[in-house]
Image (cartoon, helix red, strand yellow):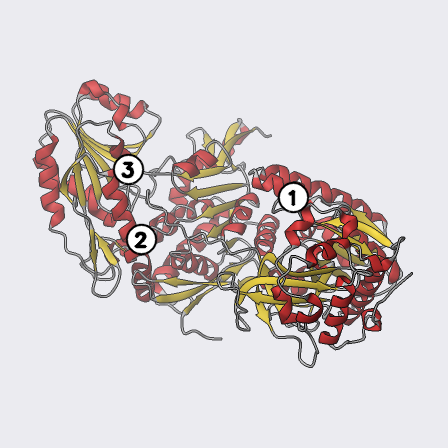
C-alpha cells in the first residue's frame, strides 16, 4: 500500500522496522508529507535490552565515525532525501525558517565533526580520560560513564537540540532517540547517517512511539534527557532523567547603558531562530523608562516580512493555522493589563499557501515581577519591564541565558552565583550565542559522567 | 428435571440451529411461567411488546431495554430459569469486571458450561493448540468467570490447570489513582509467581494478559522457559496491536501458537480469534452464534455501522441458562463480516478498544 508519502520507519537494533501502526506527518499547511511508523512497547523494551547487550565502539572509532556521519548528514542522499530536500522538508513541517534550519543543521554537523573536542570539555581538570594514562600510576581521577544506555525524548520545535545527544554517543553511550512526531526527519537522518558512518544498529536507535510506549524508553535506559515545560522539570528534577525546561532567557540593561547602542542585539535576541528557541529573549528588563525601548523594538520587529518558512528570506516561524490561533488567544488573554507596543490586536497572519505566521509581539509591563514576564511563547514575543537595583536579581532568576549590559561587578557576581541562571552573557552578546564546547545548560557531560580514583603499579 | 424445553435448545454444541427458530424457542422458555426465571417473568409485564409473539428475529432483540445494569442489584438466584427445577446444576455465581460501578452478577449453569467448553475447545483445535497438555492460567479466579471456565476446559482437554491469581480491579484502581509504580510492583509479584510454575512444571499452554506477557518476555530466564516449554499462548483481557502480535510470532516466541479470545461476563464466555489470519489482518473475533451475537452501532444514532467502520459493541446472550439481550458494552470495535461460508447470526468484531482517547491536546506555553 503506497500513499506516495515519504516513509519514516523505526531504526531498531536489527535494522529498519516497518510497523503497521503509522501516523501522518503534515506540513504547516496541513498537507501530508510523510508517514511515520510507531513501534509498540514490546519493540521498545527489546530495543533497550539490545542496547544494553551491545558494546560501544572504541573511542577513536567513535570520533571518526561521528566525523564521517557529519559529512554524510550534510552531503549525501540519506533515506532517499538530499540534504537540500531534507532541509526544505524540516522547514515545511516545523515551520522553522529555512535559514534557521540551515544554521541548526550546520551546528549538528559541527558537533559531530568536533565530537572529541566537545566531549572532552566537561572533563574535570583533575581527571584523565583513560585508566591507561600514565597519571594513574601516581593515582588520578579517571572520567567514567555513569551508565551505558542513554535515552532522549526529542523536541520538535527546532532541529538544533539534536546536536546535544551526540555528546553521549561520543562518550561511549548507546543511544535511543524518540523523535517528536512533529519533526522526526532530523533524528531519522542523523541516525541513518551515524549508521552509514559505522555505528552499529544496536548502538544508536530511533524509536518513534505513541505516548504509551514513550516511558518505556526512559525506563529501559540508564540515563535520559527530556524536553518540556515546568511540569516536566518538576517530574524529573533530581532523577536519572535530565529535564530541559523552559528557557525564559532575559536581557538586562542597567543605568549607564544606552539601549540605542544595542538595539540590534536586543531585537535579534528576540527574533533570531524565528523566536522558537529557548535561547530567545522572553523578557527585557531596563533600568529607566521601558516605553522608548519597547517602542523602538516594536518598530524594528514590525518590519519583518511574513513569508512561508521555506523562503530563503523567511525570519518568522510558521504554524498550522489552528495552533497559531490558539497561541494568539493565549497571548491576548495573558497580555491583559499590559501596554501593547506590537501585536496587541493579534499576531496571526495567515499565508496564502497555508499555515500562519506568528508575528512579533512587544508588551510593556509596569513592574519586573509581573506574572507575564515568565510567559515564554514559541515566536518573537517579548515583555519589556522596568528594573531598579532595588528589585535585585529576583526578576532575573530562572533564565537559561541572561545577557546583561552593566558595569556593576557586584551584580555580575550575583548573577554568576545565582543557581537558576544557566548562562551569563556580558555586554553585546545576544542571548542565542552558542558555540560547540561551551555548555548550553551545564555540560551534558556533567550529567553523563563521574570520576573514579585509579591507582596502579 | 421438569422441562418444557424445545429440543432446539438442547442441540449438540456444533449443531447449527435455525437462528429464528432457536430464538423463538428461547423466548418461550424464558417467558413461560413454568420455565422462565423470576427475573424475566417479573419484567415481562413492563415491556411494551410481547416477547412470545413480537420477538421473531435477532434484530427484534433491540426492542428490549438494556436490563444489564439491573444485574448489579437483583438476587442472583432470580436469574435461574424455573425450568431447571429445584436443584439446578450451578457451577458458580460470577461478576463482571466492575470498572463501571458496582459489578454485575450472572449464574453459570452446567449445561451452558459444557456447551461453551465443547465449542471453545473446538476453536483451540482449529488454532492448533495441543490437547493433553498442562495450562498455566494467569487470570482472575472468583468472582470472575474466566479462571473457573479455563480450569474446566483444561480438564476437558486432558491436562492440569495451574493458576496464578490476578485481581484486575485492584490494578485498575491503582492506575486510576496514578499509582503506576504500585501497579508495576503488583505485576512483578504476578510474574514472580508465574516463574515458580514455569520452572518446575511442564506447561504446554500459557494463558495471560498482554501486559503480563510483555513482562514475561522481558525476563530473559522466563522467556527462555516459555520458548522451551510453551506451545501455545492464549492471550485475553486486553487487546494487542498488530505490530506486537507480529513481533511475538516472528521474534519473541516464534514456535508458540498465539491465540486470543474476546470475552465478556455478559455473554457468559468469549468470542474466538478467527483461525488463519495473516499478520496484516486485524484480529477478528467470531462469536458462538446464535448463543452469543454481536452488532456494532453508532453510539449517537444507535444504528448499525457499515462493515469496516467502528462503533460500540452490542451483545446478546441467548441460551437456555440465561437471556441477556441488547447489552451495550463499553468497548468499541470494527464491524466485520462473518468468516466466509459460515452461517453466523450478527457481526464479527475486530480491533476492540475502549473509547479512543485522543492526545492531540494543543500545548501552548513553552517552546517544546
Residue B102: mark in rendering: 1
Q: Position of residue A1 (x, y in %)?
A: 49, 75
- The subunit carrying tag 3 is A
Characterize the local packing of mark 2: few (<14), some (14-19) or many (20 or more) Cα atoms within 10 angstroms. Answer: some
Residue depicted at 29% across the width and 36% down the height: A248
- The subunit carrying tag 1 is B
Circles 3, 2 touching at the beta carbon (< 8 Å): no
Q: Is B59 situated left or right of A39 in this image? A: right
Which residue occupies the foreground of this view, A253 or B175? B175
Q: Is disc 1 placed on a helix, strand or loop?
A: loop
- The subunit carrying tag 2 is A
Characterize the local packing of mark 1: few (<14), some (14-19) or many (20 or more) Cα atoms within 10 angstroms. Answer: some
Circles 2, 1 touching at the beta carbon (< 8 Å): no
The span from disc 3 to disc 1 (Cα, nearest Å) is 46 Å
Residue B347 in view of the camera = no
Q: Which residue is mark 2?
A: A323
Q: Position of residue A366 (x, y in %)?
A: 17, 29
Residue B251 in view of the camera = yes
Q: Quadrant of the N terminus of chain B?
A: bottom right
Circles 3, 1 touching at the beta carbon (< 8 Å): no
Q: Position of residue A77 (x, y in %)?
A: 38, 68
Residue depicted at 19% across the width and 34% down the height: A337
Asked if labels 3 and 2 share a chain, the reply is yes
The span from disc 3 to disc 2 (Cα, nearest Å) is 17 Å
Which residue occupies the foreground of this view, A131 or B249? B249
Residue depicted at 48% across the width and 61% down the height: B300
Amino acid at each position: 500500500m503506497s500513499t506516495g508519502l515519504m516513509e519514516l520507519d523505526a531504526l531498531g537494533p536489527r535494522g529498519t522496522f516497518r510497523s503497521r501502526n503509522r501516523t501522518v506527518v503534515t506540513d504547516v499547511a496541513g498537507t501530508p508529507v510523510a508517514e511515520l511508523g510507531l513501534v509498540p512497547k514490546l519493540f521498545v523494551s527489546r530495543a533497550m535490552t539490545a542496547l544494553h547487550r551491545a558494546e560501544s565502539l572504541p573511542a577513536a572509532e567513535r570520533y571518526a565515525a561521528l566525523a564521517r556521519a557529519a559529512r554524510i548528514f550534510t552531503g549525501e542522499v540519506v533515506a532517499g532525501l538530499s540534504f537540500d530536500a531534507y532541509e526544505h522538508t524540516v522547514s515545511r513541517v516545523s515551520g522553522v525558517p529555512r535559514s534557521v534550519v540551515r544554521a541548526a543543521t550546520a551546528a549538528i554537523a559541527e558537533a559531530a565533526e568536533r565530537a572529541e573536542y566537545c566531549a572532552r570539555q566537561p572533563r574535570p581538570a583533575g581527571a584523565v580520560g583513560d585508566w591507561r594514562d600514565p597519571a594513574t600510576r601516581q593515582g588520578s581521577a579517571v572520567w567514567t560513564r555513569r551508565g551505558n544506555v542513554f535515552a532522549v525524548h526529542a523536541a520538535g520545535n527546532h532541529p538544533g537540540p539534536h546536536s546535544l545527544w551526540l555528546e553521549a554517543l561520543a562518550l561511549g553511550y548507546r543511544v535511543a532517540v524518540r523523535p517528536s512526531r512533529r519533526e522526526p526527519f532530523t533524528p531519522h537522518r542523523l541516525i541513518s547517517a551515524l549508521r552509514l558512518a559505522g555505528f552499529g544498529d544496536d548502538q544508536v536507535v530511533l524509536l518513534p512511539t505513541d505516548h504509551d510506549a514513550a516511558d518505556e524508553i526512559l525506563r529501559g535506559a540508564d540515563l535520559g534527557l527530556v524536553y518540556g515545560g515546568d511540569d516536566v522539570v518538576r517530574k524529573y528534577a533530581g532523577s536519572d532523567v535530565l529535564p530541559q525546561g523552559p528557557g525564559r532567557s532575559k536581557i538586562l540593561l542597567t543605568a549607564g547603558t544606552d539601549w540605542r547602542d544595542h538595539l540590534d542585539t536586543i531585537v535579534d535576541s528576540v527574533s533570531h531562530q524565528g523566536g522558537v528557541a529557548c535561547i530567545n529573549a522572553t523578557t527585557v528588563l531596563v533600568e529607566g523608562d521601558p516605553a522608548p525601548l519597547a517602542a523602538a523594538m516594536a518598530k524594528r520587529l514590525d518590519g519583518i516580512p511574513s513569508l512561508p518558512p521555506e523562503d530563503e528570506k523567511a525570519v518568522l516561524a510558521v504554524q498550522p493555522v489552528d495552533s497559531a490561533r490558539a497561541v494568539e488567544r493565549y497571548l491576548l488573554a495573558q497580555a491583559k493589563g499590559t501596554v501593547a507596543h506590537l501585536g496587541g490586536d493579534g499576531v496571526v497572519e495567515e499565508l496564502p499557501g497555508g499555515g500562519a505566521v506568528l508575528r512579533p509581539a512587544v508588551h510593556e509591563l509596569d513592574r519586573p515581577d509581573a506574572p507575564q514576564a515568565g510567559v515564554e511563547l514559541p515566536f518573537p514575543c517579548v515583555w519589556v519591564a522596568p528594573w531598579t537595583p532595588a528589585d535585585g536579581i529576583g526578576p532575573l532568576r530562572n533564565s537559561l541565558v541572561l545577557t546583561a549590559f552593566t558595569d556593576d561587578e557586584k551584580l555580575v557576581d550575583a548573577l554568576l552565583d545565582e543557581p537558576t541562571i544557566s548562562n551569563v552573557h556580558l555586554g553585546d552578546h545576544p542571548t542565542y550565542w552558542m558555540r560547540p564546547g561551551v555548555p548550553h545548560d551545564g555540560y551534558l557531560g556533567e550529567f553523563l559522567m563521574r570520576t573514579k580514583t585509579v591507582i596502579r603499579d | 428435571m421438569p422441562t418444557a424445553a424445545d429440543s432446539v435448545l438442547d442441540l449438540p454444541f456444533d449443531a447449527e440451529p435455525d437462528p429464528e427458530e432457536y430464538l423463538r424457542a428461547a423466548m418461550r422458555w424464558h417467558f413461560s411461567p413454568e420455565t422462565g426465571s423470576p427475573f424475566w417473568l417479573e419484567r415481562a409485564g413492563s415491556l411494551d411488546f410481547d416477547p412470545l409473539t413480537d420477538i421473531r428475529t435477532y434484530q427484534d432483540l433491540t426492542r428490549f431495554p438494556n436490563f444489564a445494569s439491573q444485574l448489579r442489584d437483583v438476587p442472583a438466584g432470580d436469574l435461574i430459569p424455573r425450568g431447571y427445577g429445584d436443584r439446578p446444576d450451578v457451577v458458580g455465581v460470577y461478576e463482571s469486571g466492575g470498572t463501571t460501578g458496582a459489578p454485575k452478577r450472572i449464574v453459570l449453569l452446567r449445561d451452558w458450561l459444557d456447551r461453551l467448553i465443547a465449542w471453545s475447545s473446538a476453536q483451540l483445535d482449529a488454532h492448533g493448540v495441543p490437547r493433553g497438555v498442562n495450562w498455566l492460567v494467569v487470570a482472575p479466579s472468583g468472582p470472575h468467570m474466566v479462571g473457573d471456565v479455563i480450569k474446566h476446559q483444561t480438564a476437558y482437554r486432558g491436562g492440569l490447570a495451574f493458576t496464578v491469581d490476578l485481581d484486575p480491579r485492584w490494578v485498575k484502581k491503582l492506575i486510576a489513582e496514578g499509582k503506576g509504580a504500585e501497579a508495576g510492583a503488583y505485576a512483578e509479584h504476578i510474574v514472580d509467581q508465574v516463574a515458580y510454575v514455569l520452572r518446575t512444571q511442564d506447561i504446554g499452554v500459557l494463558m495471560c494478559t498482554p501486559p503480563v506477557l510483555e513482562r514475561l518476555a522481558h525476563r530473559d530466564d522466563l522467556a527462555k522457559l516459555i520458548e522451551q516449554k510453551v506451545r501455545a499462548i492464549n492471550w485475553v483481557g486486553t487487546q494487542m496491536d498488530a505490530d506486537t502480535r507480529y513481533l511475538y510470532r516472528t521474534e519473541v516466541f516464534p514456535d508458540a501458537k498465539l491465540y486470543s479470545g474476546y470475552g465478556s461476563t455478559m455473554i457468559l464466555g468469549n468470542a474466538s480469534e478467527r483461525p488463519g489470519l495473516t499478520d496484516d489482518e486485524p484480529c477478528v473475533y467470531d462469536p458462538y452464534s446464535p448463543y452469543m451475537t454481536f452488532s456494532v452501532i453508532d453510539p449517537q444514532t444507535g444504528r448499525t455501522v457499515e462493515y469496516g467502520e467502528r462503533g460500540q459493541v452490542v451483545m446478546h446472550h441467548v441460551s437456555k441458562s440465561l437471556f441477556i439481550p441488547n447489552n451495550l458494552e463499553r468497548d468499541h470495535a470494527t464491524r466485520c463480516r462473518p468468516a466466509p461460508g459460515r452461517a453466523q447470526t450478527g457481526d464479527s468484531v475486530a480491533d476492540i478498544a475502549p473509547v479512543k482517547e485522543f492526545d492531540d491536546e494543543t500545548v501552548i506555553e513553552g517552546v517544546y
